[in-house]
């Protein structure tokens, strides 16, 4: 609701300013160009999303995604000790982290929701430490292949859309480390205040 109000105010301000300055034709032209660029970007991103989602499905059918999930289980067991042996949580959680590693945030979201629902069965309607950790890990995920960002860069005309890999690896590793540390510290502080 708030975003709708903000957008209406911005559009109204643009129309009023264009009428006051006599540049209505420039605003109309720019809005049509922007709309066309938005449609082009959406179509390009839809194609990239289909490509990477298809690749993820091929990896799943070939067993590569399951292998990656098995590799992640020991680390996830340390981050989520209360659910270490709970397959209803660890399976979607592993798939969520695997999809995030591949930069497929849209493919990771359903698995993250499934893992959160499974965690909620034992939490009693209150966000547990593990649920908060899931949100942190899902939001600040490490990305080995930033497919979405590379797709946007390619749509914008970048000659080498994947040349950002070292920066993405460093930034995502730092953000996940900081997020996990903050979640652990906040969890301990919360327990002291209870």
Image (spheres, rainbow, N blue to C red):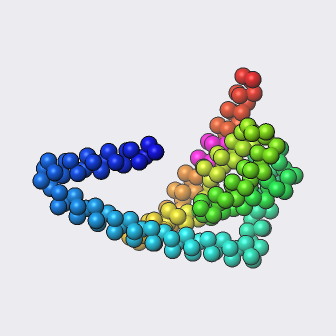
Look at 71% across and 28% down and name the residue there: 190
Q: Give the percent coordinates (x, y) of residue 91.
A: 79, 59
Secondary structure mostly seen in magenta is: helix
Look at 72% across and 33% down and name the residue there: 187
177 drawn magenta: yes
Tell me if residue 57 can be seen.
yes
Q: Give the percent coordinates (x, y) of residue 150.
A: 49, 66
Q: Residue furthest top?
A: 193
Q: Give the percent coordinates (x, y) of residue 73.
A: 80, 56
Tell me if residue 144 can be seen.
no
Choose between 173 and 14: the one closer to the eye: 14
15 drawn magenta: no
Look at 51% across and 74% down and name the residue there: 47
Decide: is 47 above or below 96.
below
Decide: is 138 above or below 162.
above
Q: Count the labels in the image.
A: 0
Q: Residue furthest right?
A: 85
Choose between 164 and 149: the one closer to the eye: 149
Choose between 122 and 81: the one closer to the eye: 122
Q: Quadrant of residue 154?
A: bottom left
Which quadrant would the C terminus be assigned to in this image?
Answer: top right
Magenta residue span: 175-180
Choose between 59 and 42: the one closer to the eye: 42
Would residue 163 appear left or right of 32 to someone viewing this image? right
Look at 57% across and 75% down and name the residue there: 51
Q: Give the percent coordinates (x, y) of residue 28.
A: 23, 61
Decide: is 104 above or below 78.
below
């Amino acid at each position: 609701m708030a975003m709708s109000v903000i957008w209406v105010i911005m559009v109204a301000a643009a129309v009023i300013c264009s009428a006051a300055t006599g540049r209505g034709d420039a605003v109309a032209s720019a809005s049509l160009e922007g709309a066309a660029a938005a449609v082009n970007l959406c179509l390009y991103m839809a194609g990239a999303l289909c490509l990477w989602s298809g690749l993820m499905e091929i990896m799943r059918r070939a067993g590569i995604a399951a292998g990656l999930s098995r590799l992640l289980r020991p680390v996830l067991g340390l981050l989520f000790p209360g659910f270490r042996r709970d397959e209803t949580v660890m399976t979607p959680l592993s798939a969520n982290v695997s999809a995030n590693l591949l930069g497929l945030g849209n493919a990771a979201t359903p698995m993250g929701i499934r893992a959160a629902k499974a965690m909620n069965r034992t939490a009693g309607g209150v966000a547990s430490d593990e649920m908060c950790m899931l949100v942190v890990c899902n939001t600040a995920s490490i990305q080995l292949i930033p497919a979405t960002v590379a797709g946007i860069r390619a749509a914008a005309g970048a000659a080498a859309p994947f040349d950002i890999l070292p920066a993405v690896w460093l930034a995502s590793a730092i953000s996940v480390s900081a997020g996990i540390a903050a979640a652990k510290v906040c969890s301990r502080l919360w327990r002291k205040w209870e």
